[in-house]
Image (cartoon, rainbow, N blue to C red):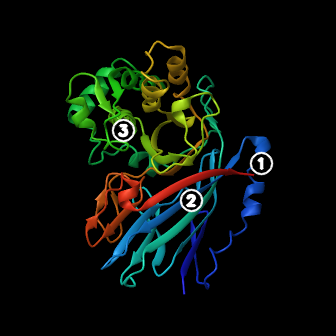
Amino acid sequence: MDRRNFLRLGAAIPVSIGAGGMAPAFSATASKDATPASEGWRVYEMTTEVMLPESPGAATVWLPVTAARLGDYQRTLSSEWIAPGGQARVTRAGPYDVGMVVIDWPRPTPGAPLTARMVNTVALRDRDVDLGAAPSARATRESPAALQEYLRPTQLMPTDGIVRKTALMITAGMTDDMTKAQAIYQWVVDHTCRDAAVRGCGTGDVVTMLKTGGIMNGKCADINGLFVALARAAGIPARDAYGVRVDNSALGFQALGKAGDISKAQHCRSEFYAAGVGWIPADPADVRKVALEEVPGGLPMTDAKVRAARAMLFGAWEGNWVAYNHGHDVRLPGGGTVPFLMYPQTRTVAGMLDSLDPAASGYRITSRRVA
């Protein structure tokens, strides 16, 4: 008998049924009614398939689950999974409440491949914060405990030493968080460069970046991680958002979208918090991605398209991307610790597989827009 688990809006409901497909979506229609297309919502189905070779011993897979509800721009309508011959469970890792499905094959059947499948159905829409509006007492407030958590250092993002020194240099003479955050954003755009040679999304090791002394190369976890670390060091609550692109850009940016096979479309975004406004998106890494990848040979920072991305990505982001979590230093239940959980993680008798190589790690992620 297959073991099947079903998750809706973050609540785990174990289901055990016979062979013949996944457990049906639970009240998905009602959830979709709350995210009408007339209000800008678009619904996507993300499918993660795990296909491991025959294993002579135990194997475990950790799959990130899409965040249940984020602001007014993301709603997970349903998540469901199947793992023939495996034992699957949903769990959350603190302190950032990182959701994941853990699948164990403690005693694999000899000669049988290990397979699993997870489908997340998510409603998304574009996000655009009016930065010119006066702070409002009616704005959504984050809890003091959460804000304190998003000021703390992490293993790869300390807030002292060279990070604090740089943050204070950038924000010298500034008194309000919005002005400071914008100065940090512009500084990061000006002093970083996307490096196509960096594997995956990078590591987020901001101290190593700052110690280069010149243009700091990296990918999104590095560049946006630098923004988050500098913001925290300046006393501004900030966080990374780890996720994956699910559709092409409708705004004309060739570099800022991916549909179909999204196995390598992971992307880390960032946010900062301002009282009276709430969480505000900021994505300096995608500005640099447009400069490097929008056209063959790249674009200068003075190009109109790069300048448009630079203006847009402080205060807005396009709803063709879904977030998994805001976690750092994530402890995998029954495994080790990873800097962040954005890629499926796999362990066999050979050890941890290369999560940045979908073929080597045995996974494939696809997306499609649904009505």
Q: CA distance from mark 3 to mark 1?
A: 34 Å
Which of discs 2 and 1 lies nearer the camera? The answer is 2
Rendered location of residue 255, percent (x, y): 51, 32
Rendered location of residue 199, percent (x, y): 32, 43
**Secondary element at tag 3:** helix
Q: Which mark is residue 115?
A: none
Residue placed furthest toward the front: 111
Q: Residues within 10 Å of mark 2 (few under 14, many from 20)?
A: many
364, above or below 101, in the image: above
Please, what is the three-letter code of the amino acid marked with disc 1?
Answer: Pro
Q: Is residue 275 left or right of residue 199?
A: right
How many discs appear? 3
Q: CA distance from mark 2 to mark 3?
A: 27 Å
Residue placed furthest toward the top: 302
Q: Is residue 177 visible?
A: no
Q: Is residue 160 left or right of residue 264?
A: left
Q: Is residue 365 visible?
A: yes
Q: Are marks 2 and 3 in contact (CB under 8 Å)?
A: no
Rendered location of residue 250, percent (x, y): 65, 33
Rendered location of residue 336, percent (x, y): 28, 64
Q: Which mark is residue 225?
A: 3
Question: 206 or 168: which is nearer to us?
Answer: 206
Residue at 65%, 45% in the rendered image: 72
Residue highlighted by disc 1: 36
Q: Are marks 2 and 1 in contact (CB under 8 Å)?
A: no
Q: Residues within 10 Å of mark 3 (few under 14, many from 20)?
A: many
Residue highlighted by disc 2: 47
Please, what is the three-letter code of the amino acid marked with disc 2?
Answer: Thr
**Secondary element at tag 2:** strand
Q: Are marks 3 and 1 in contact (CB under 8 Å)?
A: no
Of callouts 2 and 1, the N-terminal one = 1
Question: 170 or 359: which is nearer to us?
Answer: 359
